Image (spheres, helix red, strand yellow):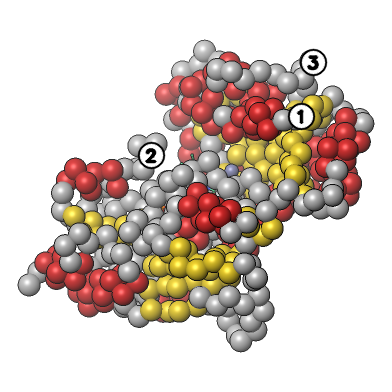
């Protein structure tokens, strides 16, 4: 029997598809930047099925690409070389909710929105929040160590995972689903699979930390003179609220202009323009007067507005959340998902803007994002009335310039989107020889036949 026939038999009816129409949406990522091909889509519904399928892949040396919601931004979920595709969409159960720990156990294919709802149903809160939350899956979030807007308060996905269930390359099931806040019994093995982008095992379920549901929220939008002033304001707001800031996002004026120009229904909430803005959110339980804390902290020294209703809060958030869309409507842009130590953001921005403008005079820097995490989406919009094609031809040179500068500032060339294929070949430039050796050793130990998402994340050794 051929390998494909063996996989189909193991998957059972309903557990696979060879239908071109059904497979097609899994082959291209949402921006159309990457596309691939696959002869077979596997759709296991249980961990045992994943295990049986991987045992066959391992025995026959058949490469397999895991895929959740297909919202990844670095091409990690795409089968570029005709690999078998394994979708986790049918691993879609909430297995348990534990309101004492508090935590829940979700299977890998549950959407992030599904996890948030399950938490809310139990009167609790799961803080991971991404614009893709209706489609992305918890298995994908774990495998990319997703970030989003609440990292400043709750951390990346890594900080929210208490345990994992993982199927190893040869089909063995590694059960690390412990609901233990404390467990000092040696290597924390689950960490190896978080952010591994499907190269070390297939995550089939995750135990996730939950939090008390916030009872109140304040959202403010303030003009600031500079990124350094924004950092000062962040410090002050953290002190005033006792660390309750749940989002602190930086926006340059050009981002606001683009949103107002392209997104109907948006407007400048302040009366006079400013070079920079911050969007601040804090949440609390009962008895904390966040509104008063915001009035003293934000309105005291700045031109600022504080949302008086949920609708106003949503309108302020829309200014931040629509920047990518507005950039797309405006034309071409070159993007970087980078992080530097929070304290060094102002100096990095000054150096990076001056360097990129030498390479691309007239380009419009749209540096926005998660200032509280030192993570900026350092984007360059093509020059006004410029030639988009000529501008995009600068992409590689621009990335090199920006990423080298990020390294010089002690930063990361991928703060939250991962490596996939997009940045794989850049890694040797920015990671030490020793780091790369340990990465390769882990890969070789856990996936000796290189069947799990081959060609992603781990750079090959270059033969001279
Ligand atoms: P996929 O895209 O299907 O896969 C991503 C990677 O994980 C691939 O390498 C895949 O092989 C692997 N994988 C998936 N499931 C498993 C599994 N069960 N076991 C092992 N490997 C697996 N990301 C952020 O961090 N912050 C943001 O704010 C953010 N905003 C976004 C906004 C939009 C509009 C979009 C489209 C994307 C955004 N992303 C963001 C990126 C993306 O949503 C995240 O990377 C998300 O975690 C991917 O989840 P997914 O289920 O779609 O995974
Ligand atoms: Zn982001």
Q: What residue appears at the point 49 percent right and 32 percent down from the top-left corner?
A: 394
The numbered disc on residue 272 is 3
The answer to whether the residue labelled 1 contacts the one labelled 2, judged by CB atoms less than 8 Å apart, is no
C-alpha gap between disc 1 and disc 2: 36 Å
Disc 2 target residue: 30
The location of residue 18, given as percent across then percent down, is 15, 53
Q: What residue appears at the point 83 percent right and 37 percent down from the top-left corner?
A: 291
Residue 281 placement, left or right of 378: right
Total numbered labels placed on residues in the image: 3
Which residue extends farthest top? 385
- Circle nearer the N terminus (1, 3): 3
Near mark 3 (Cα within 10 A), the count class, few <14, some 14-19 or many ≥20, is few
- Circle nearer the N terminus (3, 2): 2
* Local secondary structure at mark 2: loop
Residue 159 placement, left or right of 112: right
Disc 1 target residue: 308
State which quadrant residue 171 falls in: bottom left
- Circle nearer the N terminus (1, 2): 2
């Amino acid at each position: 029997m051929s390998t494909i026939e063996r996989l189909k038999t193991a998957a059972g009816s309903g557990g696979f598809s060879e239908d071109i129409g059904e497979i097609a949406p899994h082959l291209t990522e949402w921006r159309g930047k990457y596309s691939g091909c696959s002869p077979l889509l596997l759709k296991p519904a249980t961990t045992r099925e994943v295990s049986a399928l991987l045992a066959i892949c391992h025995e026959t040396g058949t490469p397999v690409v895991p895929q959740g919601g297909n919202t990844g931004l670095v091409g990690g979920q795409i089968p570029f070389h005709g690999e078998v595709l394994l979708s986790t969409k049918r691993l879609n159960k909430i297995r348990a909710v534990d309101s004492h720990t508090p935590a829940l156990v979700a299977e890998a294919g549950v959407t992030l929105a599904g996890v948030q709802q399950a938490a809310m149903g139990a009167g609790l809160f799961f803080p991971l929040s991404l614009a893709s939350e209706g489609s992305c899956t918890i298995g994908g979030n774990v495998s990319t160590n997703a970030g989003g807007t609440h990292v400043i308060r709750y951390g990346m996905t890594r900080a929210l995972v208490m345990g994992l269930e993982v199927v190893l390359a040869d089909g063995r099931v590694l059960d690390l689903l412990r609901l233990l806040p404390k467990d000092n019994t040696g290597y924390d093995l689950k960490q190896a699979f978080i952010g591994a982008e499907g190269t070390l095992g297939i995550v089939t379920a995750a135990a996730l930390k939950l939090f008390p549901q916030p009872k109140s929220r304040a959202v403010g939008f303030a003009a600031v003179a500079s990124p350094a002033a924004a950092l000062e304001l962040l410090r002050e707001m953290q002190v005033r609220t006792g660390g309750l800031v749940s989002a602190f996002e930086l926006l340059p004026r050009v981002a606001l202009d683009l949103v107002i120009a392209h997104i109907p229904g948006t407007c400048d909430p302040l009366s006079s323009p400013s070079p920079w803005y911050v969007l601040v959110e804090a949440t609390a339980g009962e008895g904390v007067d966040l509104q008063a804390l915001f009035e003293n902290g934000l309105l005291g020294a700045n031109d600022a507005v504080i949302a008086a209703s949920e609708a106003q809060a949503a309108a302020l958030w829309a200014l931040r959340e629509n920047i990518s869309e507005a950039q797309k409507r405006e034309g071409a842009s070159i993007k970087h998902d980078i992080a530097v130590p929070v304290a060094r953001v102002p100096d990095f921005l000054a150096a990076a803007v001056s360097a990129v403008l030498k390479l691309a005079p007239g380009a419009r820097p749209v540096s926005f994002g998660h200032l509280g995490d030192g993570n900026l989406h350092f984007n360059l919009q093509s020059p006004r009335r410029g030639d988009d094609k000529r501008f995009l031809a600068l992409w590689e040179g621009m990335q090199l310039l920006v990423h080298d500068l990020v390294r010089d500032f002690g930063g990361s060339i991928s703060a939250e989107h991962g490596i996939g294929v997009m940045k794989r070949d850049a890694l040797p430039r920015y990671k030490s020889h020793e780091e790369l050796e340990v990465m390769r050793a882990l890969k070789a130990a856990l996936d000796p036949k290189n069947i799990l998402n081959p060609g992603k994340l781990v750079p090959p050794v270059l033969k001279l």
